[in-house]
Image (cartoon, grey):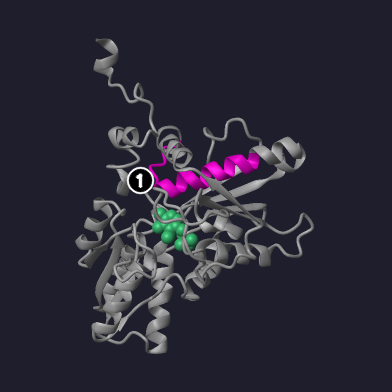
Amino acid sequence: MKYAHHISELVGGTPLVQLTSVTADLTATILAKVEYMNPGGSVKDRIALKMVEAAEASGALRPGGTIVEPTSGNTGVGLALVAQRKGYRCVFVCPDKVSQDKRDVLRAYGAEVVVTPTAVPPDHPDSYYSVSDRLVLEIEGAWKPNQYANPNGPASHYESTGPEIWADTDGLVTHLVAGVGTGGTITGTGRFLKDASADRESGPVVVIGADPAGSVYSGGDGRPYLVEGVGEDFWPAAYDPTVPDEVIAVSDADSFAMTRRLAREEGLLVGGSCGMAVEATLRYARRLQDRDPEAAARAVIVVILPDSGRGYLSKIFNDSWMRSYGFLAADEGATVADVLK
Ligand code: PMP
């Protein structure tokens, strides 16, 4: 019989799927790594597992302990999955821009959720960083994974995401594109792929970051954007800025438009940071094709899709929400009845 002893044993090993419709004008092979196939529905299951196991090994997390973390949702789900098996309590701190759907998911897994205002600087006492620090001090046996600085975040990607991509492409991957939030995914995966390809005749893997316009990674000042899970207004230790060769800024409007196309044209119901990463991928591939058509034809570009679109049904996939921000023209989204009237 083939079965896992717990759902958390099924983290990682996600598949690659070729994008064929949104890439119609491009000669490069563009492959998406579908991280919503992880049991908690996102790429963050990987870091959750590794951070908890490392904390147990170091004694930072002890039996009966409480996991306290500021998280936009996905890391919380991963931590909650792992915590359940081991009997830890979970307290998560979420900024209020995180969708109600995502908060409800955390509560469904049995976690406690504290909501804090988005519109305050990180050092403000009500910021989600400050509130989580206070909870760690006051709850006995509390441990904060601190995904923004924990080296086990990037390490989990160095040990799993990177090797999976290398093996599944038979070492032919030429480019990696990933959105940057804590920076763990791009740092760990990118570093592994560069190490693995360092002596390759065709040259090392080129690593491209995708970032919401306004965020620091692409030269912004931290100005707010609506896409969730990516972009920052500070430089986290989990991010090694020497790994990406380039960072491409994408607007909310372009990120969300591509997110909707992925669902309609590729059958991939994914989150806004996925649309952002794919938009950056297409821009890079288009530019490569213009400058060096032969290199473009040989390129095997892997783009990471961090999570599912289920958590964004009331936002990106809701026409009135999209229209309220001007992301959808007023005449888009008509029903069959409207058309036949
Ligand atoms: N997309 C989403 C939806 C996320 O939750 C995250 C994690 N913050 C990312 C992308 C970026 O991943 P990382 O933190 O590894 O940079």
In terms of depth relative to the viewer, which is nearer, 230 or 125? 125
Relative to 340, residue 67 above or below: below
Question: Which residue is at a point 67% across and 67% down the rendered structure image?
Answer: 195
* Residue at the extreme top of the image, as rendered: 341
* Residue 188 shown left or right of residue 329 in the figure: right
Q: Is the residue marked by circle 1 packed among few (<14), some (14-19), or many (20+) residues within 10 Å? A: many
In terms of depth relative to the viewer, which is nearer, 119 or 241? 119
Q: Is residue 140 magenta?
A: no
> What residue would you read off at disc 1?
309
- Answer whether residue 17 is visible to the viewer in this image: no
Residue 85 in picture, x, y percent from top left: 27, 74
- Answer whether residue 99 is visible to the viewer in this image: yes
Q: Quadrant of the N terminus?
A: bottom left
Three-letter amino acid code at the position of disc 1: Gly
**Magenta extent:** 266-285
Relative to 3, residue 329 above or below: above
Q: Quadrant for ligand 1?
A: bottom left
Instruction: Please tell me whether mark 1 sits on a helix, a strand or a loop.
Output: helix
Question: Which residue is at a point 35% across and 56% down the rendered structure image?
Answer: 41
Question: Which residue is at a point 37% across and 49% down the rendered structure image?
Answer: 308
State whether label 1 is within 8 Å of ligand 1.
no
Q: Main secondary structure of the magenta part?
A: helix
Q: Is residue 271 magenta?
A: yes
* Residue 175 shown left or right of residue 75 in the figure: right
Q: Quadrant of the C terminus?
A: top left
* Residue 129 shown left or right of residue 265 in the figure: left
Q: Quadrant of residue 114?
A: bottom left
Residue 175 in picture, x, y percent from top left: 64, 52
* Residue 261 shown left or right of residue 109 in the figure: right
